[in-house]
Image (cartoon, rainbow, N blue to C red):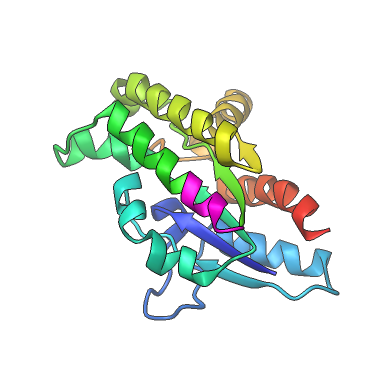
Amino acid sequence: MKILFLGDSITDAGRDRSDDTSLGNGYVSLLTEKLRPLYEDRQFTILNRGVSGDRVFDIAARLEKDCLSEKADAVVLFVGVNDVWHKYTEGTQFDAQAFAECYGSVAEKIKNSGAKLIVCEPFLLDVPDKKRMRREMDTVIKAVKDAADKYADAYIAFDEIFAGVSEASGVAAYSADGIHPTHRAARLIADNIIKKLRPFIA
């Protein structure tokens, strides 16, 4: 079974982009370590195609080369926070309608390729300097949910999940900057994705 992960720095996690088999040091690597012992009789090809800094428009531009041409059995799509964050860090425009249309197009093309599509909700933890991003993040999350309703085989509400767990353990346990996951958060991401992959593996 071939599983491909498509996203931004959360997925990239420092992978060696000159090595197609590099998984990085984030949730993709952790998921792989957990998955293979669970299914010793199955062979997996795990591909990390995350690129740090990517917005959904970047994903769309490289979709054929980095995703569709691989003919994966399952694709995990995890993108959206940079579409808002880059407005504040790089001055790029955030257009909610353009985001929704582009995300929907990406999801539709992945679904039409025959792959099972798992959509991961982008998340933003409650840290002081990111509070100004919340309104636009909610717009992004709504667009992601709407696309998932139409095209995804599974959806993981990570913004909701992290809001819940951080109330009990504190935000710092899961992210220092509200965006990039700690090791503990990466494990949580990996565990939730495995739960959604299980029906497709079985």
- The x, y position of residue 2, in whole percent, is 64, 69
Q: Is the magenta stretch mostly helix, strand or loop?
A: helix
Q: In this view, does 99 lie to the left or right of 19?
A: left
Q: In which quarter of the image is the C terminus?
A: bottom right
- The x, y position of residue 106, in whole percent, is 43, 48
- The x, y position of residue 59, in whole percent, is 36, 53
Q: In this view, does 72 lie to the left or right of 67?
A: right
Depicted 30 relative to depicted 78: above or below:
below
Q: Nearer the viewer, residue 170 or 160?
A: 160
At horizontal 47% and vertical 37% (from top left) the residue drawn is: 122
Q: Can residue 42 be seen in this view?
A: yes
Q: Which of 26 and 87 is in front in this view?
A: 87
- The x, y position of residue 107, in whole percent, is 49, 45
Query: For residue 34, which quarter of the picture?
Result: bottom right
Q: Give the range drawn in magenta.
A: 108-114
Magenta span includes 110:
yes
Q: Is residue 183 visible?
A: no
Q: Looking at this rendering, what residue extends furthest in the top direction?
A: 135
Magenta span includes 95:
no
